[in-house]
Image (cartoon, rainbow, N blue to C red):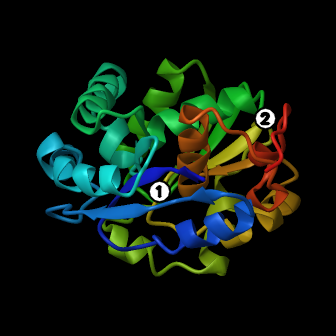
Amino acid sequence: MTALGFLYPGHSAEDDYPRMEQLLGSDIRLPLIHTDIGEDAHRVDALLEMGSLARLSPGVEELRLSGAEAVVWACTSGSFVYGWEGAHEQVRSLARAAGLPASSTSFGFAHAVREIGARRVAVAATYPDDVAELFADFLREAGAEVVSVRASGIVTGAEVGTWGEAEVFALARGGDHADADAVLLPDTALHTVAHLTALEKELGKPVLTANQVSVWEALRLADRRVNAPALGALFTREPLVQS
């Protein structure tokens, strides 16, 4: 049994995780601990507070007791808002506090883009413009070429969590670009797991979403690879380790 731990901000799309656990169809558990986010706002000052060690550390001991082998801060905006170096320090601090390998959703995106061999990416974000641009800057630091950024101007994760299939597809279509090798949807408050294969079929290219890459990143930390096509092209890369 492999247990992978997640620190998840507030309550929005956390039901994506038991869905992914089921779709992995293996001996993998995905225990999730909710963090106290403070103010729910896609605003730089609020996001810096949301991702502070003071907000994250209370959940660390719960994850340790769950038997987690790795921990991921499952929040994109609450990690990339620190910038490339700051986001590294954030996960180093989390790893020291947990005594476990640690990462964040933002690094999950950076690593997943490389995994699928995408050089040019399009960003379809729920965020306001300034926050979406910070994510694009983070991806550029990771070596990706960002060919387009669409921002939706949504301020709270709670509102994003109410979006259904129609809104998710509209976001992905609107954010796609003809030159993009992949489309990235970077908000863990967005329900996407049920739509991954349909989104990729619709757009004709890989789609990377926040909760999806968070789980993939945790598997990477634990040195596990699972073939789970229902979780999109990212989960069909060689070499495969069948459970």
Is residue 170 visible from the viewing direction of this image? Answer: no
Q: Which residue was labeled with disc 1? A: 187
Q: Amino acid at mark 1?
A: Asp
Left or right: residue 195 versus residue 211 is: right
| Residue at 47%, 56% in the rendered image | 187
Q: Which mark is residue 6?
A: none
Q: Which residue was labeled with disc 2? A: 179
Quadrant of residue 18 within the rendered picture: bottom right
- Whole-percent x, y for residue 215 in the image: 57, 50
| Residue at 52%, 78% in the rendered image | 163
* Spatial separation of the CA atoms under disc 2 and disc 1: 22 Å
- Whole-percent x, y for residue 200 in the image: 81, 57
SS at badge 2: loop
Q: Amino acid at mark 2?
A: Asp
| Residue at 17%, 43% in the rendered image | 52
Q: Which circle's residue, 2 or 1, is located before the other in the chain?
A: 2
SS at badge 1: loop
